[in-house]
Image (cartoon, coloured by chain):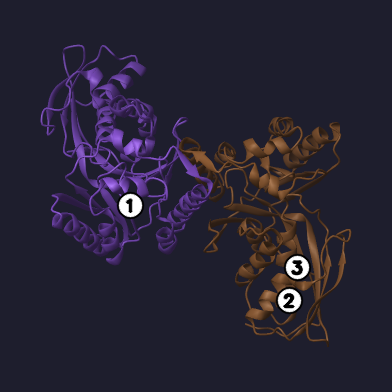
Chain colours: A purple, B brown
Amino acid sequence: MAQEELKEVRVFAPASVANVACGYDVLGFAIEAPGDEIVARHSPEPGLRIVEITGDNGKLPTEVSENTAGVAAQDLLRHLGMLDRGVELEIHKKMPFGSGLGSSAASAVAGAYAVNKLIGEPLIKKQLLPFAMAGESSADGAWHADNVGPCLLGGIVFIRSNQELDIAQLPVPENLWAAVVHPDIEILTKVAREILPREVPLDNVTQQVGNLGGLLCGLIQEDYELISRSIHDVIAEPRRQKLIPEFYRAKRDAMAAGALGFSISGAGPSVFALCEGEETARRVGAEVSRVFSEVPIENQVYVSMVNPHGVHVVA
Amino acid sequence: MAQEELKEVRVFAPASVANVACGYDVLGFAIEAPGDEIVARHSPEPGLRIVEITGDNGKLPTEVSENTAGVAAQDLLRHLGMLDRGVELEIHKKMPFGSGLGSSAASAVAGAYAVNKLIGEPLIKKQLLPFAMAGESSADGAWHADNVGPCLLGGIVFIRSNQELDIAQLPVPENLWAAVVHPDIEILTKVAREILPREVPLDNVTQQVGNLGGLLCGLIQEDYELISRSIHDVIAEPRRQKLIPEFYRAKRDAMAAGALGFSISGAGPSVFALCEGEETARRVGAEVSRVFSEVPIENQVYVSMVNPHGVHVVA
């Protein structure tokens, strides 16, 4: 139901880990931080405008049609027949670009969600998915819900079909924590994509399908051992790890420190570990950080439970 | 716990549907009939012997080391250090060979299960898996638990790893029925294997992984619509359907009659439909049978709920 309109709304959209090892293009989960903030407010001037962007080192366009948050918000207003509404957006980037943490997805989700809230919430969260997808797609040309889905809805999101936007939220085991480490290196999305195989040997398909199924069963049944046995990627990780210095050392030390599994977040360079319990996750995060620091590569560590809420209003 | 030994035991091992569309090599379910029966009894003469085989038109070897049931039973006795026990087996084949219904798996499972029962049940059902696998593997050289698993345990069985024999039983939605139709044509396993692609385009891998995950979620959540959206095989079916006359007509008519999904059982030539409710399953079975009969190809129809028990003792 539509609600009373607000004067201004500030929302936070979290980073997310896509692929999750065996779930290439079909699985992702949200974390608590980092994330982007967007403020939306009414304006007497008709149309949507981006009036301020911070935290982007001047890299992001303020032109609505060229900005992921702008495209998502604009698409939503167009759908609602409200293109003449006066709306201002402030975009506060609080996470690195090209980190493999769903930065453009977070901005796109925040843009659509903030404007929907501002105008009295005509749509429910899940209905915002295609608009956020359009926003993210405007940045990189891809059409994958594995960042947008969890950033919007929270939790662990499984995507049966990206084309049909057929997605499901999975239950999150109570004590499942993530340690995410972002090494300060740049991987071009184009390179991360081109390094993938175009064809996959049938044996590897069976392994990947088996592991993805095992991970889903493990998550649903809260079976941490099954989760651990299933977090293996035989398709993307063996290729993309080459782009991340000391990947296998970081993985070895993460596993030795008690991680359930370890792999690349999205297209990288960020890496993630899933862990049972906060203490293990903090220890694993510290170990992985140490490996990168010794290279030396500057890095940031984010330890949190899987974020069950996704994008939300902040005070 | 080991129980008192019986003089003689007769067991029934059911047919099973492997692959289940999107679950190539990782998913299978048991049906109520057809299936094989094996009688095991003590003998004063040391060692395992096959004393009678019926229903095989003389095709099966009575030599223990060349017979799937014999190999499975012998492997079990060897594991238990009981190779000198006198045991006789009667094998009653009650399902067609090379049908895609797990005929050799049924014999292997029945062999291991019958002997284990006869000698006082030293192992639980799940522990018989490697022995039954060895029996089936002796017939076709493959090592896949997608027939042996459901035939042994019943229900819908998911295999994370065939190599590690890491398998899980999935819950079966209450009203899930199967219509299985066996057209009387021969497909050589060798041909059915060679027709498969060695490499799969990455896009198809994502579709297959998405559908397998969707099917698992659908089964666990009893979401028949999600089950229906997920029963698609983009890897084996497009190739193997060429070996089954009128496959796409049968599929079209099955779907028109209300099937949730339709595909090839194992390597074929049998086909199966999953349906919500008995009435739909009977209608779908009749439609598919009619398509084959019009070719004309003789065929048998088996309609049942998913068999929750697997192999069991019969009176």
Q: Secondary structure at mark 2?
A: helix
In which image quadrant can residue A124 be found?
Answer: top left
Give percent across and percent down for residue A90. 15, 27
Q: Where, quadrant-wise, is the N terminus of chain B in this rendering?
A: bottom right
Pointer 1 residue: A263
Question: Residue B115 has which mark?
Answer: 2
Q: Is residue B205 above or below residue B49?
A: above
Q: Amino acid at mark 1?
A: Ser
Q: Secondary structure at mark 3?
A: helix
In the picture, measured across the screen, residue B144 lies left or right of residue A168, that is right
Mark 2 belongs to chain: B
| CB contact under 8 Å: marks 1 and 2 | no
Give percent across and percent down for residue B149. 63, 61
Circle 2 packing at 10 Å, graded few (<14), some (14-19), many (20+), is: many
Pointer 3 residue: B66
**Towards the viewer: B91 or A103:** B91
Question: Residue B96 has which mark?
Answer: none
Q: Secondary structure at mark 1?
A: strand
Mark 1 belongs to chain: A
